[in-house]
């Protein structure tokens, strides 16, 4: 058995069932694995991953191992880790250091455990592995060829590292690929956040005032799905172009100060800190529901919420109700962590099939191009397109093929 630190090895059978179900709906990842298996391109390579450890992620980790890699993984969020999936992965020969509910100290220990195995490739979700290498384990960086990052938050951190001149190896910005943000961020986040909200609260969205902070691709997806369920959607934005886009999409656009008194639901999706602050919490109505869809649990000012409250109780699984001095109750979902993963099962399987296919192809690209600069690099366009093409192929959908005349017309400046 590989080196590991997990909660419940006895849960492996249920984890295997979950993984089998997910694999059946991931045709793109299956096709890439099948077409690459003969050459085992990852032989001799150790992959270190910090990802949400649930069934869909397990399929990616198993594919990496099948292609020859030694794989070590830790969970990128303490409430998204599924103990049964971790147990199943260990039985599959993958080193796993994670459990649901781990505290911040244990989380950091688990990151260090993955890095102590000297990975050559990193697959990160939030850039915590990359940051830890640079902060406390620089000797590990010598053996790292590069890696990839799949979140908006992580890309921001990596670009800051590049700007400061400290990034030691290339990182592929999977998050910025069309096949990622057009589908994962928009359709995946939109559906999975609604799943988390409804599964956790069991309350009606139709007719409710629904406030979305942030109108990037994730925020748009959340707003679209909330409106589709009959909610009255208000968008809070700091960027003028996105605010104008939200307005033209039919959303009400306000500042958080203006939105605070009217919202029944608040969902943050900005990647920034303290988007909902003390002055906003003080203005919210009794029974307001607070949730976060950004990577870290910093978008809702939880210390301010604790300061304002006179009592706190778990009123339902994944719901902490804070009672304020004046009797108003504010309900925080999933400790302010990613509500779609901490309180549900994350993005739909078919969506993560595309994103994990990009992760796999990007990892192979780093191996095939050993002289890449130590920068944040885009996913090559042909790899990005190939994921969409494989998905269409799996559905039996044929693309239109341009004629030679059409190609020449598009490439010429002459009429």
Image (cartoon, grey):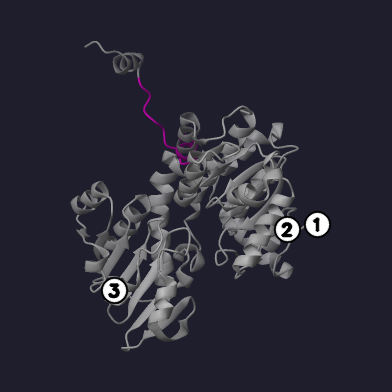
Quarter of the picture containing the N terminus is bottom right
Q: Decide which of tag 1 and tag 3 comes sooner along the chain.
A: 1
Residue position marked by numbered label 3 in the rendering: 264
| Depth check, front residue: 29 or 181 | 181
Question: Residue 410 at x, y = what percent?
Answer: 30, 18
SS class of the residue under badge 3? Answer: loop
Residue position marked by numbered label 2 in the rendering: 90
Judge left or right: residue 93 versus residue 81: right
Query: Which label was assigned to residue 1?
Result: 1
Tag in front: 1 or 3: 3
SS class of the residue under badge 1? Answer: loop
Q: Decide which of tag 3 and tag 2 comes sooner along the chain.
A: 2
| Depth check, front residue: 216 or 13 | 216
Alpha carbon of mark 3 to alpha carbon of mark 2: how far? 42 Å
Residue 396 sits inside the magenta stretch: yes
State which region is magenta: 389-402
């Amino acid at each position: 058995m590989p080196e590991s630190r997990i909660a419940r090895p006895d849960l492996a059978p249920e984890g295997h069932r979950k993984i089998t179900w997910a694999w059946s709906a991931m045709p793109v990842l299956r096709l890439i694995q099948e077409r690459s298996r003969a050459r085992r391109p990852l032989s001799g390579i150790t992959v270190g991953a910090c990802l949400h450890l649930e069934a869909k992620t397990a399929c990616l980790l198993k594919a990496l191992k099948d292609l020859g890699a030694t794989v070590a993984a830790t969970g990128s969020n303490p409430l998204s880790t599924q103990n049964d999936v971790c147990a199943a992965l260990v039985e599959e020969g993958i080193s796993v250091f994670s459990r649901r509910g781990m505290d911040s100290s244990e989380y950091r220990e688990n990151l260090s455990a993955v890095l102590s195995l000297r990975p050559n490739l990193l697959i990160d979700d939030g850039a915590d592995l990359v940051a830890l290498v640079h902060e406390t384990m620089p000797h590990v960086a010598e053996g790292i060829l590069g890696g990839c990052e799949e979140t908006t938050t992580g890309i921001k951190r990596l670009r800051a590292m590049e700007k400061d001149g400290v990034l030691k190896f290339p990182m592929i910005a999977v998050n910025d690929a069309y096949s990622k943000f057009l589908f994962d961020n928009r359709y995946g986040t939109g559906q999975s956040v609604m799943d988390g909200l409804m599964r956790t609260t069991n309350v009606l969205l139709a007719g409710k005032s629904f406030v979305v902070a942030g109108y990037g691709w994730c925020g748009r997806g959340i707003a679209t799905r909330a409106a589709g369920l009959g909610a009255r959607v208000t968008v809070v934005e700091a960027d003028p172009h996105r605010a104008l886009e939200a307005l033209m999409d039919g959303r009400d656009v306000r500042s958080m100060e203006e939105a605070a008194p009217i919202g029944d639901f608040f969902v943050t999706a900005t990647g920034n800190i303290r988007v909902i602050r003390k002055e906003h919490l003080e203005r919210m109505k009794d029974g307001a529901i607070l949730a976060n869809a950004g990577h870290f649990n910093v978008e809702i000012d939880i210390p301010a919420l604790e300061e304002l409250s006179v009592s706190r109780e778990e009123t339902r699984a994944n719901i902490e109700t804070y009672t304020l001095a004046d009797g108003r109750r504010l309900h925080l979902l999933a400790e302010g962590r990613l509500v779609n993963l901490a309180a549900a099962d994350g993005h739909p399987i078919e969506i993560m099939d595309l994103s994990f296919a990009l992760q796999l192809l990007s990892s192979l690209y780093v191996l095939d191009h050993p002289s890449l600069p130590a920068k944040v690099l885009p996913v090559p366009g042909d790899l990005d397109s190939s994921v969409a093409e494989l998905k269409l192929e799996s559905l039996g959908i044929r693309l239109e093929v341009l004629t030679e005349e059409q190609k020449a017309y598009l490439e010429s400046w002459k009429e």
